[in-house]
Amino acid sequence: MEVFQLQVNGETKTFLAEGEWTVLHVLREVLGITSVKPGCLTGDCGACKIILDGRAVNSCTLLLKKALGKSVVTVEGISTAKELHPLQTAFVEKGALQCGYCTPGFIMSAYALLSENNNPTKDEIVEAIQNNICRCTGYVKIVEAIEYAASIMRGEDHV
Amino acid sequence: MSDLRIIGSSQPVTEAWNKVTGKTKFTADMKMDGMLYAKILRSPYAHAEILSIDTTVAEQMPGVRAIAHCFNTPDVRYNRILKNYDYTDEQQLSTEYVYPKVVRFVGERVLSIAADTEKQAQDALSKVAVKYKVLPAILSIEEALNEDAISIHPHHSNLLCDKQFAERGNVAEAFQSADFVFEDTYETPIVNHVAIETHAVIAHYDSEGKATIITPTQSAFSVRSVLSRIFGLSMNNIRVIKPPIGGAFGAKIPAILEPQALHLSMMTNRPVKIVFTRKEEFLANTRHASKIRIKTAVSKEGKLLAQEIDSVINTGAHAADGVNVAGALASKAFYMYQIPNLKVRSRCVFTNLPSAGAMRGYGSPQIFFAQQSQFRKIAEKIGMDFVDFQESNAITKEYHKGEFGNTFLLECIQRGRELFHWDERIKETKVNSDVVRGIGMSVACHGNGVFKSHRDFAGITLKANEDGTFSMHTGAHEMGTGVIKTQMMIVAEILNIDLDQITYVECDTDVVPHNIGDYASRGVYVQGNAALKSAEKMKEVLFDLASQYLHIAPENLDSYVGGIIGNKLKSATYSDLILFAHRDLQKTVQVEESYANEGIRMSYGAHFAEVEVNVKTKEIKVLDYVAVHDVGRVMNRSVLEGQLHGGIQMGLGYALSEEYIIGKDGKIENAHLKKYKVFHAKDMPNITVDFIESIDLPGPFGGKSIGECATNPVAPAISNAVANALGLDFTALPVKIN
C-alpha cells in the first residue's frame, strides 16, 4: 500500500491504495463514490464510465497508476447542491431511466459528447453511447433525453 | 378519454432524482461496520459427487473468518422459490441444498469463504482442495427424455412434469377432416436476463438472533420463507429488506445467495456481503430452452380448426419453478385464437445445466415463437395475407363470452397494420440483390398476475400525517417497472391529492403488509388494485372525519385537491381532519386493505418488423418496428412506453443474437458480455408504439399489464420478417442464415 493523490470531481483526494487497483475499485471502496457501478468488470457494459481528462472511459479496466496526474469526473461532480446538470434533469423528465443502474454511465458518455459537441446528430448520440448497455429502456428515451439536454445547453429549451 | 387528474400522465419512476445524481445505493454500494466479503468456489464438472473437501490451508490464510460447504451446513433440501410458506414438494419440488453433496452443473456452488476483504476470500478459495467423483452428465432435452439416462436427482425422474392440459373439442377428428394439416418443431435456446446489476446480498445475523437480509429480490416474503425453512428461524427473526434493484426481469425472484450469506453471518456473527461477478450472473438464472412441436389444421379459407401442441422445456439442474413455467406456457394457447379443438401437452426436464427460472415472459416467448412462426408459414402456403389470417382468427370478447375481460387483440392488429403500412410494404417487389428486405409480424398475450395458479393478493397500508400528507407502506418491489409510482398515482387520484403529497416505505418484511412479489406482470393489476382499495378505504375514513368535523352528512360532502368540502362556508383540509382526529378523538388515521385477484385478464400486443438481410455477410439488420398493445388504460405514459421499448430490446436479442453456447463438458463457453451479445444502441431499429385502451375492469381504472407482453411477440415478428425476406422458414432461435 502506498499513498496516492488523484483529482476527483475538482478536489485532490489523498488515500492509501495499490497502483494495480482499478480506478473503479478506488472510487467505490476507498473514496465512497458509488455512482460508478460494477456491471461486468471487463469493460463491456459501460456502467463504470467516468470522464478522464474530458474523455468517457471505463474505470473497471483503468489501473490507478495510469490515471495519476489526470482529472476524474463522475456524476457526483457535474452538479452542485443548488443546480443539476441539464443531462440529469433531461433523463428524469424524458423517462430515460427505469432501474437507474446504468444511468450514471450513460450520463458520463453523454457528458463527454456534449462537452465537445453541443449540437449532435442522432447518429452522433448513438455512437457516443454505443458502449453502454441498458436492459430496461431499449435506448429510445435515453437518446431523446440527450437531444433534450443538448437543446437546453444551447439555450433553446428550458428546464 | 381522460377525466382523470393524474392517471394517464407521464411520471418518472420513484427515486429518479437520486438515481441521476448517484445518490441511490444499490446493494453492492452498501457497507456495514465489520462487514466480511464472501467468494464462492464453483464446480468444474457438470455432474459429480463431492467426496472430500480439504480446507486446512485455506483456513490459515490471512483474513479468513469462515468457510462453509456441504459438510457443515444444514442438510435441508429446498426450492429456491418458495412462493408460499406452506408449499410442499407437490407444488414446488425441492432439489437444492445450501451447498450440495452432488454438484449438478458446471459452476454450481461448492463452498464459500468469508474474509475481511474480497481479495483475501478469493485467494483463500484457490487453496481449497476438493475431491470429486465425476458422473455422466445430461446436456440436452433429447438426452433427458431418454428413459435409460442417469437420474439427475435421486428422488425424482428427469421428467420434472408431464401435464396434459385440458383438451377442448376433438383434435384427432378435426385433423382427419381438415383441408390442410401442418406439423413443425421449433427450438429456442437458453438465454440470460443480463440485468446490469448482478445478484448481491448483505446478511447480518446479530447477537439478538435476528437476521437482517438486504437483497435486491423480487419477492422479499418468499426469501423469508426459504430462509425460515432452511435454518429453522422464526419469521419474526428474519427481516428481509429490499433495496433499489438494478434490473431483474425474473432473475431476482429466487433465493439464490441469501441462504449462503446468512449462514456465513451465523458462523461469524458479522455482516456478510456477496456480489456476483458477471460470469456468476450467467450461471445464476436463465430462461428455459424449449423444443415445441405444433400440429395445426386449417380450412382452405384460412380458419384455424385444430391445434395440438407438445412442448418440452429445460429447467436445468433444479426444479425451481419449472413446473409453473410449463403450465404458463401451455395456458397461452387458449387465449389467442378462435380454435374449437385444442390439445396441449407440456413437459419439463432436468439437465446438468444452470438452473432456469422466470425470465420475462415465463414460457410465452417460447410458445409464441413456435406458434407465430408456423402461422406465418401456413398463411403463405395457403396463399393468404398473414395479417388477414391473424384478423380472421383472433380471439374476441364475443368468442370467450367475456370470461377474460375486454379483449382488444383485433384492434391492436388493425392499428399496427395501419401504422406500419403493412398493405403497401407487403406489395413491394424484391430486387435481386445481395441485400434484401422483408417484413413480418406476430401477436402475443400475457396475463396479469397468478390467478388460479397461486394465491394472488397484496396489502397496502396508508397513513395520514398531521399536515395532510400521506405515507404508503407497500410490499411492491420497484425494479424499474414504476410499480410504486403507479400505486402512488392511484392513491393520489382517489384521495384527490397532488403526487408530491404521498411518499412511501418499500418492501421490508417487518413493516409492510404481505406481498407475494413482483412478477407475472402483477404490477398494474394486483399491486395497483391493492393501492386503489386502500385509498378508497382511506377516503371513507376521511369523509367520516369530515362529517364529524363539519357536521354534514357524508353524502353531502365532496373532495377537492387536498381536502373535503360541504358548501361554500364549510370545508376542511386533510390537515384539519387529521389534527381533529389526533386532538379531539385521540385516534390515529391509518388503514390497511388487501386485494385478491378476481379473475383472468390478458394483455395483448401486435408487433410488426422490417428487416434487411445481407445474403453475403449473413448480417441481419432491423430497420423499422411497430408495436401496439391493449393495456386497458394508460396509467403512466412514459413508463409504459419505456417498458415496451425495453421489452423490444430484449426480444430482439432473443431473435437474433443471444444464446448460451454449451461445451461438450457442460461448461457455458460464452458467459461473458464480449461473447454473449445483447443489443446496443446502434443495433436498435426505429420504433413506433401505440396503445389501445380497452378499459379492462376490474383492473385499476381499467388498467392492465405490459411488462412481459412487451417482449413476447418480438422474436417471431423478427423471424417472420427474415423468412419473408429470404423465402425460407426458420425453426430455431436465434435466427441464423446458413
Image (spheres, coloured by chain):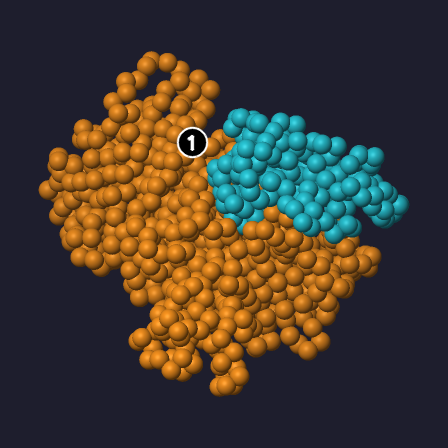
Chain colours: A cyan, B orange
B637 displayed left or right of B480: left
Q: Which residue type does callout 1 highlight?
A: Asn
Q: Is residue A93 visible?
A: yes
Residue B460, x across and y down, in percent: 45, 69
Report the quarter where the C terminus of chain A lies.
top right
Q: Chain of mark 1?
A: B
> Residue at the location (54% across, 46% down)?
A92
Q: Secondary structure at mark 1?
A: strand
**Front in this rendered view, residue B591 or B417:** B591
Residue behind mark 1: B686
**Quarter of the rendering containing residue B494:** bottom left
Q: Is residue B195 visible?
A: no
Up-down relation of residue B674 to residue B539 (above or below)? above
Residue B321, x across and y down, in percent: 44, 58
Outermost residue to the bottom: B585
Outermost residue to the front: B569
Up-down relation of residue B114 to residue B182 (above or below)? below
Counting the numbered discs, the total is 1
**Quarter of the rendering containing residue B268:** bottom right
**Front in this rendered view, residue B482 or B177:** B482
Outermost residue to the right: A2
Residue B410, x across and y down, in percent: 23, 44
Outermost residue to the top: B432
> Residue at the location (25% across, 22% down)?
B427
A40 displayed left or right of B633: right
> Residue at the location (69% across, 34% down)?
A57
Residue B208, x across and y down, in percent: 68, 78
**Front in this rendered view, residue A61 or A46:** A46
